[in-house]
């Protein structure tokens, strides 16, 4: 900007520019160089791509009026909640438009019914003598492109032998573009309403000299691309175990797994580690490329808030690549030029594994730290093959990094991230006060006649599979035996008697706040040929809301992200929603420390799932000294004609959860008393 644009504007008579996209701040930046340009009656033509969001693009592809959509996008970009210096610059541009010395057109790719962003970047200056300067380069007309990320520009001077033909070709290309004669491009006039808004601003703003190139036209920190540093927040009290975890990871050369109980602050521990690493790299005058991976979009949103607390505004990498790719490219370019100390990106696993982001990552050659939240999710064949081999530093976070029935995936994660650097189990976390104490209340619920018949039939089929050589150990979930086990778990999870027991327990706690109800997935199983029964989550909502008149709301995969935030806020207020009724969506990562009572209706023998659910309830919060977990275990009536050995083997899997929950609770003796009759029936007293 300072060494090319400003000097060129100071002598040019005309300026023609085609660029990928513009922002209101970048238009204002033009004003720095064109103050003298304007006094000499210079004229300027600008072609840029409007900032079309995903809704805009879909509207165009559906046949909506193109000019109306472009007008909407342009007005959105020209909302004048800007700093005074930005408004002064825009005001000058408005006066140039009013004087017919600035004209703007908007271009986008339109091919085979699809809409894309116009990315070409060329420019032409001519002076009073007719001399020509043509240039092409990688920068956009944004603050980052003009000020921080100017990677390279090829400049061709019309008076230099060998350059003149190239400069004239660029000018001819621009002329064709301006006349809307470029194939596959649609070039629209600048919307009249946006033009009038800039002109009005030009009339309203005082005519005063614009600041020099060294002033603070820079956008405010929350929207700028200025270099930033990772710093520990002043309010953060680093716990001893967090310090130990970071030190252990650094001793392993910045690689390894933190196996820490849910609720003990893995996120902040990881950010402390990243901050320490960034400090070391800063002393070496090296940037840090920080990539955080999370399985779900709401976890990305939580991570963004966490990273901002440490002084850096990260880029959210999910949904449309048009939203994040230009920003990522700009910031990575700034890091390569030594103009940005930290580039932070938070991506969903699916966007991370996508082709566009993989292409970006493959070109990173600065020190990169990959932090994987709920790292066990990355052990699948698709995700583990996408993990960047050029990441110098690697940190995996999970209370349960081992993948259930997937030793290969578990081994692949350890190979990539390194061995466990630090482990903080639940018992130790409770003892040191990092998590709260809890009571565990198992409820035994008998199956009804219809459920028992279906259960007996499924158990017989399972016994047949085992007799034919299948093993209950390391069962493939997609195998015939895996399918039967899922069906059996569905019968247990959807047992009708659980709703009756839940009603009794809820009634005794109807005046309590902060209650979570975890429902079984899917619908109630039925006999072959019969339609599936209702969803348990719907039955529970009907029970809690309609029959018991308690304030509750479902929290499921279909709950939109903005609504989820509102629900969590209402739940945490302690005076609005008494209960959230969930189905899986509160398993991983969601921060709801106020939750005090949990009802587990789902029959899950997956240790990760029930450990995550327990962790949701054991987080510390003001006024919370203990939690309560009610676990509903469905069993067939005594005397049910089923294969004893097979049923005993299957029941062991069910009781493992109860034992895991009970042994660390404050009332383990009560748990043993409740489970004793069942253990005696199946000769499991040694469990």
Image (cartoon, rainbow, N blue to C red):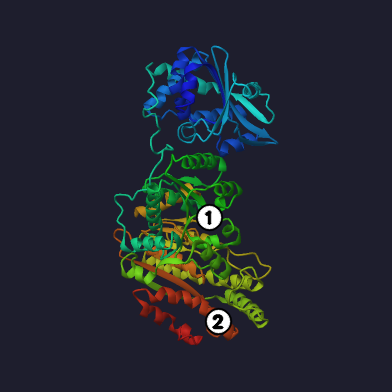
* Residue 141 coordinates in the image, percent (x, y): 51, 30
Q: Is residue 567 left or right of residue 376?
A: left
- Dot 1: what SS? loop
* Residue 396 coordinates in the image, percent (x, y): 47, 60
How far apart are the two marked residues, 1 and 2, measured between alpha carbons? 33 Å
Residue occupied by mark 1: 557
Residue occupied by mark 2: 649
Q: Earlier in the sequence, mark 1 or mark 2?
A: 1
Please name the residue shown 42% across and 73% down the image: 661
In this rendered view, identify the residue nearer to me: 552 or 136.
Answer: 136
In this rendered view, identify the residue nearer to me: 635 or 541.
Answer: 635
In the rendered structure, find residue 540 and report the number of the disc placed on it: none
Residue 360 visible to an observer of this rendering: yes
* Residue 423 coordinates in the image, percent (x, y): 40, 68
In this rendered view, identify the residue nearer to me: 260 or 279.
Answer: 279
* Residue 605 coordinates in the image, percent (x, y): 51, 72
- Dot 2: what SS? helix
Q: Is residue 386 left or right of residue 661?
A: right
């Amino acid at each position: 900007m300072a060494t090319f644009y400003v000097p060129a504007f100071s002598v040019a008579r005309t300026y023609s520019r085609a660029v990928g996209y513009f922002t209101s701040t970048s238009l204002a930046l033009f004003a720095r160089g064109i103050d003298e340009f304007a006094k000499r009656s210079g004229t300027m033509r600008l072609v840029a791509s409007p900032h079309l969001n995903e809704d805009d693009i879909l509207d165009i592809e559906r046949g909506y009026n193109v000019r109306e959509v472009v007008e909407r996008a342009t007005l959105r970009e020209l909302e004048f909640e800007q700093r005074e210096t930005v408004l002064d610059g825009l005001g000058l541009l408005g006066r140039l438009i009013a004087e017919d010395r600035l004209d703007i057109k908007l271009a986008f790719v339109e091919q085979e019914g699809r809409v894309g962003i116009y990315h070409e970047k060329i420019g032409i200056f001519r002076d009073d003598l007719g001399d020509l300067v043509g240039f092409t380069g990688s920068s956009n007309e944004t603050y980052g492109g003009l000020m921080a990320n100017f990677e390279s520009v090829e400049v061709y001077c019309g008076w230099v032998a060998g350059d003149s033909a190239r400069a004239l070709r660029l000018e001819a290309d621009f002329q064709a573009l301006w006349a809307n004669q470029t194939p596959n491009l649609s070039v629209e006039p600048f919307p009249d309403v946006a033009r009038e808004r800039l002109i009005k601003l030009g009339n309203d703003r005082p005519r005063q000299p614009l600041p020099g190139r060294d002033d603070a036209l820079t956008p405010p920190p929350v929207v700028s691309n200025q270099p930033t540093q990772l710093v520990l927040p002043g309010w953060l009290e680093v716990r001893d175990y967090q310090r130990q975890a970071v030190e252990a990871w650094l001793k392993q050369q910045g690689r390894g797994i933190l196996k820490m109980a849910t609720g003990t602050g893995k996120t902040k521990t990881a950010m402390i580690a990243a901050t320490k690493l960034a400090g070391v790299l800063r002393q070496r005058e090296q940037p840090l490329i920080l990539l955080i991976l999370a399985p779900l979009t709401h976890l990305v949103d939580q991570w963004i808030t966490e990273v901002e607390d440490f002084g850096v505004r990260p880029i959210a990498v999910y949904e449309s690549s048009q939203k994040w790719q230009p920003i990522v490219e700009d910031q990575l370019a700034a890091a390569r030029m030594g103009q940005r100390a930290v580039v932070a990106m938070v991506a969903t696993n699916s966007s991370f594994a996508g082709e566009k982001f993989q292409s970006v990552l493959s070109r990173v050659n600065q020190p990169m730290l990959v932090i994987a939240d709920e790292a066990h999710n990355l052990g699948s064949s698709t995700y583990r093959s996408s993990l960047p081999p050029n990441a110098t530093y690697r940190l995996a976070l999970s209370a349960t990094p081992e993948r259930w029935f997937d030793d290969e995936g578990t081994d692949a994660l350890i190979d990539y991230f390194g061995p466990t650097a630090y482990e903080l189990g639940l018992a130790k976390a409770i003892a040191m006060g990092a998590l709260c104490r809890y009571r565990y209340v198992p409820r035994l619920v008998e199956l009804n006649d219809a459920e028992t018949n279906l259960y007996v039939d499924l158990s017989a089929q399972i016994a047949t599979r085992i007799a034919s050589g299948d093993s209950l150990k390391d069962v493939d979930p997609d195998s015939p035996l895996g399918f039967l086990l899922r069906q059996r778990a569905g019968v247990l999870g959807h047992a009708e008697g659980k709703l009756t027991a839940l009603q009794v327990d809820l009634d005794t706690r109807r005046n309590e706040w902060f209650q979570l109800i975890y429902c079984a997935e899917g619908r109630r199983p039925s006999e072959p040929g019969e339609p599936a029964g209702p969803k348990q989550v719907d039955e529970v909502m009907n029970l809690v809301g309609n029959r018991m008149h308690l304030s509750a709301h479902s929290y499921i995969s279909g709950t939109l992200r903005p609504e989820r935030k509102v629900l969590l806020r209402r739940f945490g207020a302690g005076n609005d929603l008494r209960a959230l009724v969930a189905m899986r969506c509160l398993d991983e990562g969601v921060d709801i420390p106020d939750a005090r009572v949990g009802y587990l209706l789902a029959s899950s023998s997956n240790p990760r799932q029930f450990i995550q659910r327990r962790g949701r309830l054991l987080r510390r919060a003001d006024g919370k000294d203990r939690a309560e977990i009610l676990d509903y275990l469905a069993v067939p009536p005594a005397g049910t004609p089923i294969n004893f050995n097979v049923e005993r083997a299957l029941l062991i899997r069910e009781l493992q959860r109860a034992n895991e929950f009970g042994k660390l609770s404050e009332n383990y003796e009560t748990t043993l008393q409740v489970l004793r009759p069942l253990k005696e029936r199946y000769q499991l007293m040694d469990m």
